Image: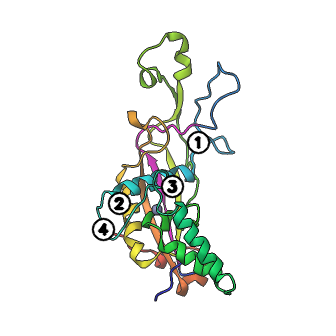
């Protein structure tokens, strides 16, 4: 049996770099409500330099749910997707008891951790194998996407968007800040120990990112949050070039052809 590529040793690493372009305005809200109820804080989230950014976790979240929808509709029967919130592939009591029993039976084994991790992995859908779940670490990481260059921020009148009726008095409450279209963000995603048969999933992820169909943040139903990955560069690091990568960083000859 071929080994499952868990995260306990190095098999490979894929790195995707590029520029995320805001094709429409984006509103990713900051921590939320202001303490003063009259001063509703509808500003966009900003980094420690006061610049707007796209949190990697938000982007990973929308990417995951997009893939869940895509794969659960059965576009490729090799790949499966569960609904991580409502119907996870691993999470019911019976399955967890089963894992607990295995844990008990192998605890004297020096390789117990790996055996259990493999047992968990076997029970996961494709999406959970790559994006992780409460019992299994994610293989895919998306860094926070920081602004490249400048962005224009504006305040948008949200009255027409957020409710149908109301008075001008609470108009201000609905105004929100947005990052205008055209903003560019640095994109960096990595996937560790991707199984060879999941390379097609990575290609699908790249296609989705480059298609401009993903939307991040709020007000997406009225067209906000459209992002597109451009200037994509994908690298694949394997055992034979790991040393070179660690000593000298990414090089042209590490590029991976994904189209
Ligand atoms: Zn799953």
Label 1, on which residue?
52
Query: Percent position (x, y) of residue 124?
Result: 47, 68
**Mark 1 or mark 3, which is nearer to you?**
3
Q: Residue at x 52, y 36 (%)?
A: 152
Q: Earlier in the sequence, mark 1 or mark 4?
A: 1
Q: Which residue is mark 2?
A: 71
Marks 1 and 2 close (CB-CB < 8 Å): no
Secondary element under disc 1, as helix, strand or loop, is loop
Q: Mark 2 to mark 3: distance in Å? A: 16 Å
Residue at 46% over, 62% down: 89
Q: Can you say whether 79 is above or below 53 in the image? A: below
User: Which is closer to the viewer, label 1 or label 4?
Assistant: 4
- Looking at the image, which is closer to me, 58 or 25? 58
Q: Quadrant of residue 244?
A: bottom right
Task: Residue 227: say if magenta.
Answer: no
Task: Give the structural element (helix, strand or loop) at label 4.
Answer: loop
Residue position for label 3: 60
Q: Earlier in the sequence, mark 1 or mark 3?
A: 1
Residue 247 visible: no
The magenta segment is 12-29
Mark 3 is surrounded, within 10 Å at the Cα level, by few (under 14), some (14 to 19) or many (20 or more) other residues, namely some
Secondary element under disc 3, as helix, strand or loop, is: helix
Q: Earlier in the sequence, mark 2 or mark 4?
A: 2
Q: Nearer the viewer, residue 56 or 124?
A: 124
Residue at mark 1 to residue at mark 4: CA–CA distance:
40 Å
Residue ID for mark 4: 77
Say whether disc 1 or disc 2 marks the residue closer to the N-terminus.
1
Element class at badge 2: helix
| 258 w.r.t. 81: above or below | below
Q: Compared to 127, does 120 lie above or below?
A: below
**Where's residue 131, x and y in %?**
51, 62
């Amino acid at each position: 049996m071929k080994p499952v590529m868990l995260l306990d040793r190095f098999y490979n690493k894929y790195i995707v770099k590029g520029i995320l372009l805001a094709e429409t305005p984006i509103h990713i809200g900051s921590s939320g409500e202001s303490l003063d109820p009259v001063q509703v804080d509808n500003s966009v989230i900003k980094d420690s330099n006061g610049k707007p950014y796209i949190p990697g976790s938000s982007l990973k979240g929308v990417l995951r749910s997009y893939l869940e929808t895509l794969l659960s509709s059965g576009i490729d029967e090799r790949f499966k997707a569960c609904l991580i919130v409502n119907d996870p592939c691993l999470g019911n009591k019976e399955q967890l008891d089963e894992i607990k029993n295995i844990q008990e039976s192998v605890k004297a084994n020096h390789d117990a951790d790996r055996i259990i991790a493999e047992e968990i992995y076997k029970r996961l859908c494709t999406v959970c194998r790559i994006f992780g779940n409460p019992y299994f670490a994610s293989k895919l990481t998306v860094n926070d996407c920081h602004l490249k260059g400048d962005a224009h921020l504006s305040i948008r009148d949200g009255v027409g968007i957020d409710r149908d009726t109301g008075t001008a008095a609470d108009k201000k409450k609905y105004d929100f800040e947005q990052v205008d279209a055209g903003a560019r963000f640095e994109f960096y995603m990595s996937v560790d120990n991707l199984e060879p048969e999941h390379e097609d999933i990575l290609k699908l992820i790249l296609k989705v990112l480059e298609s401009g169909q993903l939307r991040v943040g709020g007000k997406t139903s009225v067209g906000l949050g459209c992002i597109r990955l451009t200037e994509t560069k994908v690298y694949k690091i394997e055992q034979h070039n790991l040393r070179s990568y660690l000593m000298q960083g990414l090089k042209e000859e590490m590029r991976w052809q994904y189209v």
